Amino acid sequence: MNGITTAPYSPLGQRNLRAKHIAIVWAVFAIWPFAAGNDYMLSLGIFFFINLLLIGGLNLTMGYGGQISMCQAGFFGMGAYVSGVLAMRWGVPPVLGALVAMAMTAFSAFVIGLPALRLSGHYLSMATLGFNAILSVLFNELVSVTGGPNGLSGVPPMSVFGFVFDTPGKFFWLAWGAGLVLMLLVASLLASRAGRALRAVSGSEVAADSMGIDPFRSKLAAFMASAISAGLAGALYCHFNQYASPETFSFSASVLLVVMVAIGGWGHFWGPLFGAMVFTAMPELLRRIHDAELLVFGACMVAVMLFLPGGIASIATRLIRRRQSAAAKQSEKAGRHGIA
């Protein structure tokens, strides 16, 4: 019985295999603080993990749930401002503030998702876009709370049980751990009944409903999980920079996050990892032509849709399938020769 449940292609077997791969990849990432050379390069590693939280959460809604959300940057900003304001203006411990931020984004996603997720396609995109626009206005107009266009400055650094993450070298491990937890949770989710139900809903809501799955509940749960991940990313971003600006959480940021999910490979487990790499590295490479950044991202999106619909992660999937197919053919030929 145990051999069946942990077979390589069973959900539990896939979860265990993914966990092993995650351990290897994160062990490689752990080398970065020693190879970065300076605080600037180390900061890029921190932003990579923050972007991974954003894109990994959005991949749950888009890649596995089949719903296009255009408000991930809004949740990102909500997490940043809630945690930052609580810590700076009311002296709330940053860890507690981050938890409150995650709870607030989850509640907001629940309230917005109740009506919005009954829509689909372009209508859902427009509804979530409207929510992002509302948040952008609030970030700018609530000057007494958020600092308005000037931003929220003077945010204290993150601290956990008295240990202060006040340098990039210290904060890296916090972001590293947050990214690790996200990937492990997603691996467990995909192996669970809830994860399989979510993918069934993405394939066909009618078919999923006929099998006893509640499509709306699955979509709402994925939407809330995506918001929680963005809320945590916002809290980490705000306490690392000790500053938050409304322009970081604008509509264009939500569009770029959707693009990164597509480029990385939506519906692929490792897709957010590649998307986060591109999202972190591309602005640095295009710093001299900042005005053309959206143009380049748009061109990348068109190229991916035309020539690589499955994103970067699909390349590895194709290679694995080819190897498996070649191995199967070789074993079949060997079996024929043995019979002969």
Image (tube, rainbow, N blue to C red):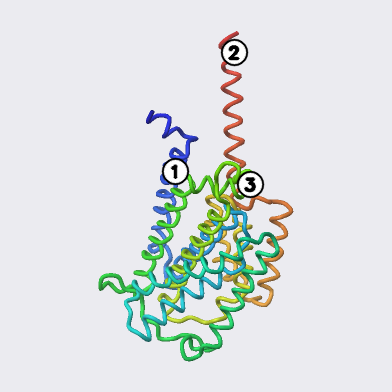
Neighbourhood count class around disc 2 (C-alpha, 10 Å): few under 14, some 14–19, many 20 upward: few
Percent x, y of residue 163: 27, 72
What whole-number distance in Å separates the C-alpha atoms at marks 2 and 1?
36 Å
What whole-number distance in Å separates the C-alpha atoms at marks 2 and 3?
42 Å
Q: Which of 278 and 180 is in front in this view?
A: 180
Q: Nearer the viewer, residue 157 or 70?
A: 70
> Which numbered disc flags the more N-terminal residue, 2 or 1?
1
- Give, as a three-letter code, the residue at label 1: Arg
Percent x, y of residue 164: 30, 74
Q: Is residue 65 left or right of residue 39?
A: right
Which image quadrant is residue 68 in?
bottom right
Seen in the picture, residue 265 relative to 109 is either above or below; the reply is above
Q: Which of marks 2 and 1 is in front?
A: 1
- Give, as a three-letter code, the residue at label 2: His
- Give, as a three-letter code, the residue at label 3: Gly
> Which numbered disc flags the more N-terminal residue, 1 or 3?
1
Neighbourhood count class around disc 1 (C-alpha, 10 Å): few under 14, some 14–19, many 20 upward: many
Judging from the image, what secondary structure is the residue with disc 2 in? helix
CB contact under 8 Å: marks 2 and 1: no
Q: What residue is rendered at 49% in x and 67% in y?
A: 230
> Which numbered disc flags the more N-terminal residue, 2 or 3?
3
Q: Is residue 270 left or right of residue 177?
A: right
Name the residue carrying label 3: 203
Q: Which of 31 and 242 is in front in this view?
A: 242
Q: Inspect this view and state whether residue 25 appears.
A: yes
Query: In the rendering, which numbered label is found on residue 15?
Result: 1
Neighbourhood count class around disc 3 (C-alpha, 10 Å): few under 14, some 14–19, many 20 upward: some
Name the residue carrying label 2: 337
Judging from the image, what secondary structure is the residue with disc 3 in? helix
